[in-house]
Amino acid sequence: MRKLILLMLIIPILELYILIRSSQTIGFGNTLIIVILTGVAGYYLAKTEGKLVIQDINREMARRNIPGDEILAGLSILIGGFLLLLPGFVTDIVGITMVLPVTRDFYRGYFKIRIENMIMKGYTRLRIRW
């Protein structure tokens, strides 16, 4: 939880710094256009990839298989799509890597390991503490 709070503090500061520096380098208008284009492109990419993953989930369920990997891929696309909608270059880079099929396997493996560790430690439900 502490790591998440730390990330929520550091990432916006880093994003703001990078946006200001890029605005000084390439201009405010160009920076704004890039941020808007990555948001729109990210939305369509996440939507397209999400539909493909839903098809994969349905296909696995029709075969009477548990679609575990496909659900983790869907989680990666969901988080990546959210990050792509946030303004900033760092979140866009992470978001794109979570949505693209080539790099999505890394995140799927990470989520899988985290879930397996939770199961091995005896966590039977997800606990979110505020």
Image: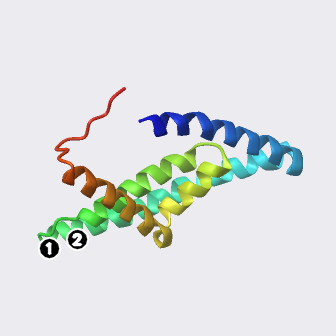
Q: Residue at x 11, y 69 (%)?
A: 64
Q: Does residue 4 sit above or below 101 in this rendering?
A: above
Q: Residue at x 30, y 65 (%)?
A: 70
Q: Is residue 89 left or right of residue 118?
A: right
The residue closer to the viewer here, 96 or 42, is 96
Q: Are marks 2 and 1 in contact (CB under 8 Å)?
A: yes
**Residue named by callout 2:** 59
In the picture as drawn, the residue positioned furthest to the front comes out as 121
Look at label 2 and name its amino acid. Answer: Arg
Residue 18, image x, y percentages: 75, 45
The quadrant in which residue 51 appears is bottom left
Look at label 1 and name its amino acid. Answer: Arg
**Residue named by callout 1:** 63
Q: Is residue 118 left or right of residue 64?
A: right
- Say what secondary structure mark 1 lies in: loop
Q: CA distance from mark 2 to mark 1?
A: 6 Å
- Residue 41 appears in view: no
The residue closer to the viewer here, 110 or 43, is 110
Specify the quadrant that holds the N terminus: top left
Specify the quadrant that holds the C terminus: top left
The residue closer to the viewer here, 113 or 48, is 113
Report the number of discs. 2
